[in-house]
Amino acid sequence: MAYDFEKYREKRERVLGVKKRGVGFGLVATVVSLVILLGLGMVVIPKSIAFLQNRQLEDAIYKVSGNHDDAQQVLAELKKQDGVREVVVDGHGSRVVVTFNKEVLDTARISAFFLKQGAQAVLLNEVGHSQRMHTMKKEAAATGGQ
């Protein structure tokens, strides 16, 4: 007959003085590791996703002159173009910021679109979308703090 370890476990532990105390080190180390990884994940993952979604975006700033109603119609048509994500007009209505995917579209094609539509638009600047957002945040903080 084979010796059954499970049958005599409690008796061996009593004789040897083995006492179970609290939670094991492995469980504590696992829980602490999971908490650290989840905390870092909650901080890093959303920023990584936002970066990956916006990495191909560029902003082109145009000065548009001419009839206001015609310009609004041209801008509505521009919003429908492939690769254009957003078209924003400033408060005065003379400057337009076009946010576009640089893999699909470029400023030469946007300028050609304005020419084709008969709108007078001059490219003032082209910047990365994240750079423009960062600059706008800094400007908002500077004007909001005064």
Image (cartoon, rainbow, N blue to C red):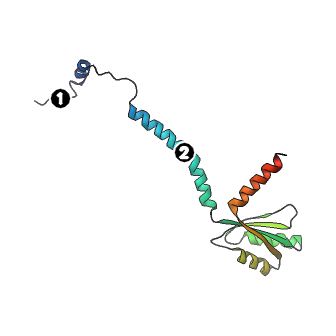
Residue ID for mark 2: 40
User: Viewer-proximal residue, 26 or 78?
Assistant: 26
Q: Residues within 10 Å of mark 1 (few under 14, many from 20)?
A: few
> Is 55 left or right of 59, judged from the image as shown?
left
Residue, far left:
1
Amino acid type indicated by mark 1: Asp
In this rendering, would 139 be left or right of 41?
right
**Image quarter hosting the N terminus:** top left
User: Residue 13 falls in which quadrant of the image?
Assistant: top left
User: In the image, what residue occupies the spot 70% across and 72% down?
Assistant: 81
Q: Quarter-wise, where is residue 103 in the image?
A: bottom right
Residue 72 is situated, as x and y percent measured from the top left of the image, at 83, 69
Percent coordinates x, y for residue 61 in the rendering: 77, 68
Asked if 47 appears above or below 14 in the picture, the reply is below
> 19 or 7, which lies in front?
19
Q: Amino acid at mark 2?
A: Leu
Which mark, by number, is residue 4?
Answer: 1
Tell me the quarter of the picture where residue 3 sits: top left
Q: Secondary structure at mark 1?
A: loop
